[in-house]
Image: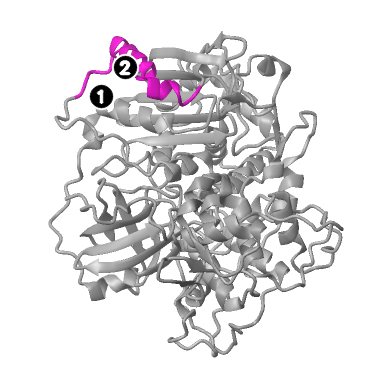
Amino acid sequence: MAAALALTLLPPAASFAAENPTAPSAASAAGVSTDLTASSAVKFLDDFFAQDSIKELAPGAAVVVVKNGQILAQKGYGYADVAGKRAVDPKKDVFRMASVSKTFTSVAIMQLVEQGKLSLDADIRTYLGDITFKNPFAEPVTVADLLTHRSGFQIQDVLAEDISPDLSEYVSMKDYIGKHMPDVVREPGTAYMYDNFAFLLLGYIVQQVSGTPFETYMNQQVFAPLGMDSSSFLTTDVLKARAATGYAGGEPLDPYALRPTVMPQGGMLSTSDDIAKFMLAFLNDGKSASGAQLLKADTVASMEEYRSMIHPLLPDTTYGFEAPSQLPGAGSSSKVITKAGDVPGASSLMFLIPEHKTGVFVVYNQNGGLREQLYAAFIDRFFPQYAEAAKLPDYAGESPEQLARYSGLYKDLRVESLVSKVGPESRGRVIISDPLTGERALRQVGPGLFVDATGLFVAFKTEADGSVSYLKEPYLNPAGYEQKGLKPAGFNDIPSTHPYAQYILDLQSLGYYPNDPNQSFGPDQAVTRGEYVDMLMRTSAIPLSENEPELKDVAGSPYAAAIQTAYEYGLISGNEKGMFQSDRPITRQEAAVIIYNSIASLYPEELLDVVDLTGKTDKWAVPAVKLAVMLGYHGPEVKFDASGAADFQSKKVLTRAENAAINDMLLTSTLTGAMHLDDAEASEEPAA
């Protein structure tokens, strides 16, 4: 369940990557490029968007290509509104820019740096006024840390309630920040985690330092000088009338507002025509066609430079941009800077190749991976040199004993329910697995650098003492690192031979249990319904509801927020009296039903026909118990007879040890489960 629910919590770009664990198309083997001209750009776009597989990804798209100070191609494809048969007009139709907004917020910050009004190296507390947060580290969070997504803040992402149907509501940045301000949990500047809240703070800093409302500053100092008269961080009546309709699964979405109302990290509205004006100026050392100097040339150059990376083949971020998606064998080119964005009903991508003064922007009105395919195809056609296989020196690889330092569990910094497991296989080879993409082999091609069968790279960050702290991989969530779990200390009542020791130690490593060997675990203690739901919400990393409990007997429970969250997600319900009975021990079949309620839609009921049960299970719980058996969400307490039928011990009370097994398997086993519905790809040879 943890991984399945993670798909609903991931930013759409990462969600797409997780659901589609295949590499982008490789560049032309011949490496022959086509000269990028107006005619070749138009032909490329027309051919690309004529593909049926591309048409299926979004009802409509607007795209623009610029080079050497000129717009080479600017076109609309499909419909801005399907019902009204309104074709996309790239000059007039307004789309949500989503996280492409961050680049423009970064421009505002860099303008203020140029003016000497703020410093990239300054502690952000200097500019936040009465906004406070805890930082237990000696290193401060700097403005540069915010720009490069290395703040060290606990994740505080956009919440479900931040998407509101009330278009008249106004929530200020300060009020929102004051309510949701996170604390620092990692040393600032040490790890990459895509951080929406950091860019909200940057927008607030622009407002604080300039003395002007953020949206006004952007209109006056960024949009107006470039002639971007169809861009705004506030929804005006004029822009609303020209807005493209957003879709999900081909169905139109109702209009919605975001919180805070002015959202520096993702609230910008614009057209592809306006974005072209920005790209032309940025690629011209910051000077627009009219002569307006948006930024100094040196500032532009500083925004093109990658500031963090584990390995040069896998750069992370610049001031305002991020690395492109990996191409097989090539990694992510440091010669390209990009910014992607997603909000419900809109996905976008801007990518720039500064040394060729080339830029491309695409936006479309349904979330999905169209942009990744466009990027790979464009590079293949016009700039195949950026997709050439990296030239790496011969590397024998470390011994299995040396590779052991990479072994362990790694938890995604942004979506904590995404967990990868790494273990050595043979010299220079490790196995990595996760619930969404399964198991695959990695071949070592350099210190801390590995490649898989598709030619995509995984890099491990090594500290000065030789220990491994983080990894970066291309599938689960490329926009950030995964942190290696602690070495588990164990519990004084769990010997290494205990049948549930590994499950318990895994969760201890990931921080779900105290890492204190002097404490007792109590493996045979019964788990209450409240405790079970609380643990499930923790391992699923679902932000807890702030609403009052709706079930009558939940108020006052230490697990009230977790229970209310599970209730809102439809995982639990009350009895005929509206009670949950959080203090009552939970039975194993009840536990299975709660998991079933979260993921049943992923598994057609006929799949469960392959599972036979023995022992007693109530009829209402049979599908849930079958699914738990099929997916392996249990420990050694489940016994199988000679025919393969499973005794789930459905009516017994769940113990703490058994609950550890369930949650560990939720975090680490594949969604195809123990019945091997799909063949794992671990047998594939990593790319040579």
Instruction: Identify the mark nearer the N-term, 2 or 1.
Output: 2
Which residue does the numbered mark 2 point to in the structure image? 44
Give the residue pinned by disc 1.
Answer: 381
Please tell me whether residue 356 is drawn above or below residue 134 in the rendered image. Answer: above
Q: Is residue 224 above or below residue 313?
A: above
Given residues 236 and 600, the one toward you in this image is 600
Q: CA distance from mark 2 to mark 1?
A: 8 Å
Q: Residue at x 46, y 40 (%)?
A: 16
The residue segment tinted magenta is 33-58
When asked about the image quadrant of residue 253, the answer is top right
Residue 287: percent from the left, percent from the top?
A: 45, 23
The answer to which of 366 and 69 lies nearer the viewer is 366
Residue at the (58%, 55%) spot, across then down = 623
Label 1: which secondary element: helix
Residue 442 point in image, percent of width and height: 26, 57
- The answer to whether residue 402 is left or right of residue 169 is left
Which residue is at a point 76% across and 40% down the rendered structure image?
172
Q: Amino acid at mark 2?
A: Phe
Locate residue 18, reporting x and y percent: 44, 46
